[in-house]
Amino acid sequence: MDSAPTLTQRIATRLRSWEGLLLLILLVVVVLNTVFAPNYLFGDLGNQNQVNLWWIGIEKAIVVLAMAFVIINGEIDLSVASVMGLSAVVVAILWEQGVAIEIGILVALLVGLAIGLFNGFWVAIVGLPSLVVTLAGLIGIRGLAFMLIEGRSVGNGETAFPTWFEDMGQQPVSDLMGFLGSIPFIDRAPFALFLYFGLLLLAGVVLGRSGFGRRNYVIGSNKDVALYSGVGVVRHKMTIMVISSVIAALAGVLLASHLGAVRGSTAFGWELDIITIVLLGGVSIFGGSGTMLGVFLSTMLVLNIRNGLGLSNVPGHTQTGVVGLLLILSVLLPNMMESYRGWARRRSLARAARASRDGPLPRS
C-alpha cells in the first residue's frame, strides 16, 4: 500500500504546478520593481506603496473571487463592472435625493441581487449562453447608470457623502477603530482589504472543501454528466450568477466610498482586468479547473505589474495593453502546457508498448 506523500513532496508538487510558476513570476516582478523603483518595497515610502498597491485595486480583487466561481462553473459574467458602476450610482443618486446612505447601500445590493436573478434566469433556466446574456447586461446596465446620473458627478460639494461613509473607503482601519496602529502595513490598510482577505478565506474553503465547491467543478467539467448524476445544475448556476452580481454591487458601494464621488463611467472597462486575473490564476476558460490560491497569486501579480509600471511612469493605456497581453497568455499557456503533457503521455505509452511488443534484448 502506497504511503501518503510527505510535506516536502506536496510542496515540491505544488511548486511544479501553475501556481508555482505564478509564484516564481511574482518574485521576479517584485525584484525588478525593487531595482527600477527604489520606493517600491523598502522604507516608509515602500510600506505606503504596498498599501496603495492594494488600495487602488481592492474592489477589483473582491469581484475576482466571485468571477472565479463563475468561470470554473463554465460560465462568464461580463456585466460585473457595469453592476459596480450602477450600484455606486444608485447609492449616490439616492443620497442626493435625501435618502439615508444606509438605505442607499441596501437598495444598491438589492439591485445587484435583481440583476443576478435576471442573468441567472436567462442562463440557467432558458439556457442562453452567459457570454451573450452578460454582454447585453454590460451595455444595458452601463447605459442605465448614465441615464440615472446624466453625466454629472455626485458625492462632492453640496452632495458630499457622509463622513463615516467616505472614511470607510479612504481611511485606514487603525484610524477608524483606534487599534492596530503599531503593526507595519496593517496600520495603513483600509477596511476593504480586511474584507477581501475574509472573503478570500471563505471562498477558498467553499471552493476546495465543500459540496458546493465540488458541484461547481463537476458542472464546469461536464454539465450534462452533472445533470444526469442528479446535481441541481439549474439551481447552482442561478446561485453562482446571483453571487457574482451581489459581490459586484458590494464592490461598487466600496468604490463609491473610496472615490468619494460617482459618475456614470465609474469602474468602466474593469471587466478586462477582472477576467484576466482569474484566467491568469489557472482557471480554465472552459470551466472545471482552477484554485483560489492561483487566483490570489495572479491578483498579486497583476497588481504588482500595474504598480511597477505606474512607478516607472508608463502611461495607463500601455498598462492596459500589458494586461491584454496577459489575458492572451493566460488562455494560451495552460492549453499549450496541457497539450505538451498529453503528447508526453502518449509518447511514453508508445515507448512502453514497443518495449512490451519487442520483449527484452537477448543476452550475449
Image (spheres, rainbow, N blue to C red):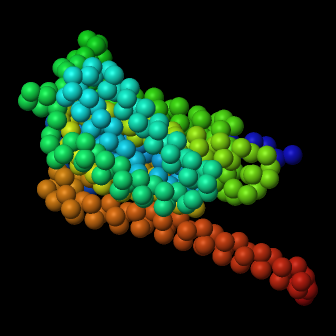
Residue 7 position within the rendered picture, expressed as x and y whole percent measured from the top left: 63, 40
- The image shows residue 79, relative to residue 114, as above or below, that is below
Q: From the viewer's perspective, is 171 left or right of 326?
A: left
Residue 41 position within the rendered picture, expressed as x and y whole percent measured from the top left: 24, 41
Foreground pick, 40 / 271: 271
Residue at 79% x, 46% y is: 230
Q: Is residue 126 visible?
A: yes
Residue lying at the far top of the rendered structure: 178
- The image shows residue 118, relative to residue 285, as above or below, that is above
- The image shows residue 222, relative to residue 99, as above or below, that is below
Quarter of the figure with the C terminus: bottom right
Residue at 25% x, 42% y is: 148
Foreground pick, 118 / 183: 118
Foreground pick, 70 / 241: 241
Residue at 57% x, 59% y is: 128
Q: Quadrant of residue 110?
A: top left
Residue 300 position within the rendered picture, expressed as x and y whole percent measured from the top left: 37, 46
Q: From the viewer's perspective, is 307 left or right of 64?
A: left
Residue at 41% x, 32% y is: 109
Q: Quadrant of residue 17?
A: bottom right
Q: Is residue 16 visible?
A: no
Residue lying at the far left of the rendered structure: 157
Q: From the viewer's perspective, is 336 left or right of 180?
A: right
